[in-house]
Image: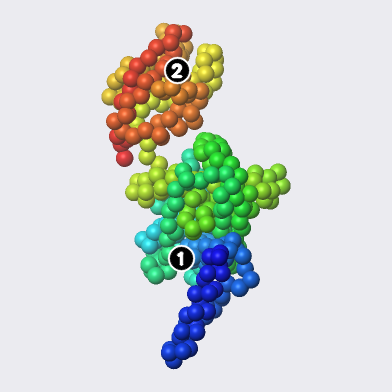
């Protein structure tokens, strides 16, 4: 007997028992699940009803001055979706939803609107955390899942609030894992979830959920020449979100271990015929300089002499700054990396111990 039939039998037995002993029968839900719904439909309805109170509407404004009266006015500049992270009033959305905003507001599911401030931004991961001063009883945080447990074919649900009127739902499956997309600052976001659940521009920043109502990703973009959903959407995995959001709340930015170099333009390494990260400057007292790495120098005739070019960290190639930072972000202060670099055309190695960043 299926779970749906079993629930129906239990409910009928409960009603008969209540009638025989003179007790009041249970009060029916104001929005009951139709009896003819399939098990999958029931699950979809239950997840939507559970999670939609957590989904909010994010609006950004530009402040302009009236030429005649000189009064300041807030003009809507764009909008997106977000979701409640905690009862402390923190809301997560995409960085590109709030980028360049001069004022922000958040509309909760009960249609109350609250001014929002930026708690932290991570353009590298297209994530932002906002803060509102709403009562705790209006804030419903989502339970966090584990994106490492996902597999292709798993059911997913995307909830958005594209027009600030009410939550909307689309469903689909995990189409692929381990994808890469480009963040607003052109950094690569790795291990992204691809889904065929329709993600439209107004749904950016909304939650991607599994069939138990857990957050497994943050909807961030679609791949479509027309700008409309074409069955290819992407979400930032919740395991990345769980690492980044606490940093944004505490420090206001993404915090990574310190290697201690300033990057030279990527064309410098190409000019030397090397695929790697050229060091512009390695400040004294920082991990890189302590391990003997050197930056560029000015020659006797005013010319710039190329410094060291890092081509790999441990066994991971660092053909560009993005690959270099991806390795650093996967470690913590105190970790030691084997650094492979080129100096004056010769391959060398050294070991660099990452330090705690200055905050």
Task: Work out whether mark 1 precedes mark 2 in sequence or the reverse, and give the earlier one.
Answer: 1
The answer to whether residue 37 is left or right of residue 55 is right
In the rendering, which numbered label is found on residue 309?
Answer: 2
| Secondary element at tag 1 | strand
Q: Is residue 140 above or below residue 289?
A: below
The Cα–Cα distance between marks 1 and 2, rounded to whole angstroms, is: 50 Å
Q: Nearer the viewer, residue 260 or 156?
A: 156
Query: 247 or 153, which lies in front?
Result: 153
Measured as percent of width and height from the top left, residue 142 is found at 44, 59
Residue at horizontal 52 percent and vertical 57 percent from the top: 211
Taking the image as shown, residue 106 lies to the left or right of residue 243, namely right
Q: Residues within 10 Å of mark 2 (few under 14, many from 20)?
A: many
The answer to whether 21 is drawn above or below residue 50 in the figure is below
How is colour applied across the structure in the image? rainbow
Q: How far across and down, in percent of the image, does residue 337 sit?
A: 36, 24
Query: Where residue 28 sits: x, y (%)?
Result: 52, 80
Q: Nearer the viewer, mark 1 or mark 2?
A: 2
User: Residue 270's x, y, as percent?
Assistant: 54, 17
User: As drawn, which residue projects farthest toward the bottom?
Assistant: 22
| Mark 2 element type | strand
User: Which quadrant, please, contains the C terminus?
Assistant: top left
The answer to whether residue 75 is visible is no
Q: Nearer the viewer, residue 74 or 156?
A: 156
> With respect to residue 212, does 191 lie above or below?
above
Asked where in the image residue 330 lies, by quadrant, the reply is: top left
Q: Nearer the viewer, residue 28 or 112?
A: 28
- Identify the residue at horizontal 59%, vertical 47% (top origin): 153
Tag on residue 223? none
**Residue under label 1:** 114
In this rendering, does residue 331 appear at all? Answer: yes
Q: How many marks?
A: 2
């Amino acid at each position: 007997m299926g779970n749906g039939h079993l629930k129906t039998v239990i409910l009928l037995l409960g009603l008969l028992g209540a009638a025989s002993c003179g007790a009041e029968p249970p009060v029916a839900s104001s929005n009951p699940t139709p009896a003819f719904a399939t098990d999958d439909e029931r699950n979809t309805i239950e997840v939507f009803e559970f999670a939609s109170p957590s989904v909010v509407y994010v609006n950004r404004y530009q402040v302009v001055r009236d030429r005649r009266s000189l009064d300041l006015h807030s003009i809507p500049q764009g909008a997106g979706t977000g979701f409640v992270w905690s009862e402390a009033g923190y809301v997560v959305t995409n960085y590109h939803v709030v980028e360049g905003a001069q004022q922000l507001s958040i509309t909760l599911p009960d249609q109350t609107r609250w001014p929002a401030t930026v708690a932290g931004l991570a353009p590298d991961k297209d994530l932002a955390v906002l803060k509102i001063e709403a009562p705790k009883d209006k804030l419903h945080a989502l339970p966090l899942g584990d994106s490492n447990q996902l597999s292709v074919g798993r059911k997913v649900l995307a909830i958005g609030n594209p027009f600030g009127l009410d939550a909307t739902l689309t469903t689909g499956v995990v189409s692929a894992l381990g994808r890469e997309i480009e963040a607003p600052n052109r950094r690569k976001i790795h291990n992204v979830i691809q889904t065929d659940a329709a993600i439209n521009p107004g749904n950016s920043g909304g939650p991607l959920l599994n069939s138990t109502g857990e957050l497994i990703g943050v909807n961030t973009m679609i791949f479509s020449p027309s700008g409309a959903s074409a069955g290819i959407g992407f979400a930032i995995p919740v395991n990345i979100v769980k690492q980044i959001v606490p940093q944004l709340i505490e420090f206001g930015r993404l915090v990574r271990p310190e290697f201690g170099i300033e990057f030279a333009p990527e064309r410098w390494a190409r000019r030397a015929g090397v695929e790697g990260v050229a060091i512009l400057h390695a400040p004294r007292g920082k991990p890189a300089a302590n391990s003997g790495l050197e930056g560029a120098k000015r020659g006797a005739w005013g010319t710039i002499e190329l410094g060291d070019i890092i081509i790999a960290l441990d066994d991971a190639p660092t053909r560009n700054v993005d690959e270099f930072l991806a390795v650093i972000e996967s470690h913590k202060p105190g970790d030691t990396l084997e650094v492979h670099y080129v100096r004056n055309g010769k391959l060398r190695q050294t070991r660099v111990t990452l330090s705690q960043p200055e905050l």
